[in-house]
Amino acid sequence: MKLQVLLISPTDPNHPVEYKYLTGGENTYTQTLLHFPPDGIEFTYFTQALKLGWISYHPLYHFLLFLQKIKLLPPGPRTYVFKVRKHFDLVYAHAHPIKIVGEKVPVVVSDSSSNIIFLTEYLKLSSLVIKLWYICKRFVFGGFGIIDCEVNLRGAQGFFVFSKWARHIKKEKFDLSNVEVIYPGLAQPRKKPAGHKRKIDIKFLFVGVWFERKGGRILLKVFRNLSKTYTNISLTILGELPPDIKIGKTEPITHKDFVSHSKLQYYFATHDVLVHVPIEVEGYGMTVVEAMANSMCVVVSDVCALPELVEDGDSGLVVKANSEVDLEKKLMRLIKSSQLRLNLGRTARRRFQAKFALRVFQQELRSIFVKAIK
């Protein structure tokens, strides 16, 4: 019999008010779990379990939601408190703080990085405000027994993060030791059919709903400068642009505000180079791994976990964050050498197969689930 696992993990909203509130890589991770569960595991997504009446919201859920709305708790993933009415062998919660009421069931939790990174680096909030929030968070979560990947792991039978960089954050900021690292796996796309011809043009790709934070403005400036010299290059931007940026009709630039994940695969398959160069911080970089799976040459900045994903000069190129000079230099190298692009793309795919392939992830995830149950 398969192990029955209740899955609590973020997905993109059906109708986002603003594209930047899409969960992006977290949604990719959740969809991968649902479509490609490990052998012997059957996931039930929590929204489906709610519809079937297998779980229900506990009154504590609404109280904690109220505390977050009045800003006694910090902004971040919603805290879920469920009363369980159907037997599950295990509950797996990714990114969300969780408490299960009723039947005693093992709980495994994971985090891509840390919500404190979002508060400090993305929202740029005062360190004093964040400190006060976390004092409240420790008190409330500890008192109510909320399992959380930052302030309270009591009650969790398993805990892991997505990168060594994230593990360092957990240890440095929250004094958490013995944190396991499991790289999220992705399904490997099919190789392009024999006889598939790529255009001579070099196609650069940028994907990101946080345009400026992902380095979009720097890339656009560098690309426009390069396009004055090299007429065989083009750029596709997938993500909402700031109001002050306009794309000229004659520029070799294609822009789309939003592309579904299924359609995104087309762009990975038809472009040559992914440029993902956040200027300060990046939680993980799922887009980078997806590009590597498609044998794309990848250019990333030297922040957070990105140098952990891409080995400079071997499976891609790593540039200095927020450096137009370094980015232009590296992109020029790729424009001038088709062999370099080909070699980096091939090595990127091999690195994906060894470190980030679905089969590797499934084995590690199943192992931590079985260990938690035992």
Image (cartoon, rainbow, N blue to C red):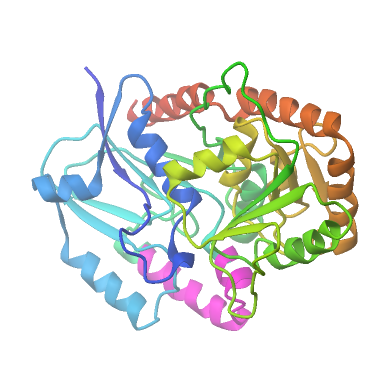
Residue 33, how many percent across, how many down? Answer: 38, 35
The quarter of the displayed image where residue 220 is located? bottom right
Residue 273, how many percent across, how many down? Answer: 71, 42
> Residue at 43% of width from left, 60% of height from top?
22
Depth order, front residue of 370/13: 13
Residue 298, how many percent across, how many down? Answer: 72, 41
> Residue at 74% of width from left, 26% of height from top?
347
> Residue at 75% of width from left, 60% of height from top?
219
Quick check: 224 above or below 192?
A: below
Residue 182, how many percent across, how many down? Answer: 55, 35
62 left or right of 130 in image: left
Q: How many marks?
A: 0
Is residue 179 in view from this perspective? no
Answer whether residue 126 is magenta in the image.
yes
Quick check: 113 above or below 213?
A: above
27 left or right of 313 in image: left
Tell me the quarter of the image containing the N terminus. Answer: top left
Residue bounds of the magenta highlight: 117-141
Answer whether residue 198 is magenta in the image.
no
Name the outermost residue toward the front. 250
Tell me the quarter of the image containing the C terminus. Answer: top left
Is residue 99 in view from this perspective? yes
> Residue at 85% of width from left, 57% of height from top?
226
The quarter of the displayed image where residue 269 is located? top right
